[in-house]
Each structure stands twice: as C-alpha cells, then as structure tokens.
C-alpha cells in the first residue's frame, strides 16, 4: 500500500478507509485484527 498508489486507491474506493489489515467478507469490511468478527461473518 505504501508503494502502490493503484492498490491504495482501490482500497479507499472499496472500503472508504486506508488501514491495514482490512478484510472484506461479502459486503462487510473488517478493519484491524478481529478474528471473532471475521469468524462471525464467515458463518
């Protein structure tokens, strides 16, 4: 992200944020390391 302007722009376009880690599960976005939320979204 720091070196790839296209990836950075894509992240902001898709999620409205510029943070890592950012994980998209379906239409939901999890920002930060939150295994419980990721697990909940994968159910």
Image: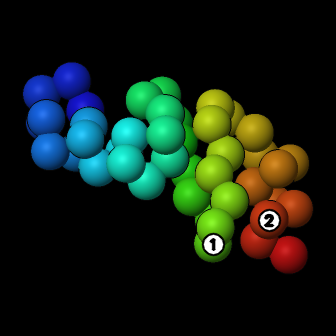
Q: Is mark 1 on a helix, strand or loop?
A: loop
Seen in the picture, residue 1 relative to 28 is either above or below; the reply is: above
Residue drawn 37% across and 48% down?
Answer: 13
Q: Closer to the camera: disc 1 or disc 2?
A: 1
Where the C terminus falls, by quadrant? bottom right
Q: Estimate the spatial distance between the alpha carbons at disc 1 and disc 2, rounded to whole Å.
A: 8 Å
Q: Of 36 and 24, which appears nearest the observer?
A: 24
Where the N terminus falls, by quadrant? top left
- Which residue position is annotated with label 2? 41
Q: Earlier in the sequence, mark 1 or mark 2?
A: 1
Give x and y (percent) for residue 28.
68, 59
Give x and y (percent) for residue 27.
64, 67
Q: Of 27 and 21, which appears nearest the observer?
A: 27
Give x and y (percent) for residue 4.
13, 36
Q: Is mark 2 on a helix, strand or loop?
A: helix
- Which residue position is annotated with label 1? 26
> Mark 2: few, some, or many residues within 10 Å (few <14, many ≥20)?
some
Give x and y (percent) for residue 9.
25, 41
Q: Of 35 and 14, which appears nearest the observer?
A: 14
Seen in the picture, residue 18 relative to 6 is either above or below; the reply is: above
Is residue 7 visible to us here? yes
Its colouring scheme is rainbow
Residue drawn 87% across and 62% down?
Answer: 40
Seen in the picture, residue 38 relative to 3 is either above or below; the reply is: below
Residue positioned most to the top: 2
Residue drawn 77% across and 71% down?
Answer: 42
Asked whether disc 1 touches disc 2, contact meaning CB atoms under 8 Å apart, the reply is yes
User: How many marks overall?
Assistant: 2
Give the left or right position of residue 39, taking residue 1 as reference.
right
Q: Quadrant of residue 33?
A: top right
């Amino acid at each position: 992200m720091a070196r790839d302007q296209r990836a950075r722009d894509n992240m902001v376009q898709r999620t409205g944020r510029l943070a890592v880690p950012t994980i998209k599960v379906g239409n939901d976005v999890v920002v930060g390391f939150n295994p419980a939320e990721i697990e909940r979204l994968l159910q």
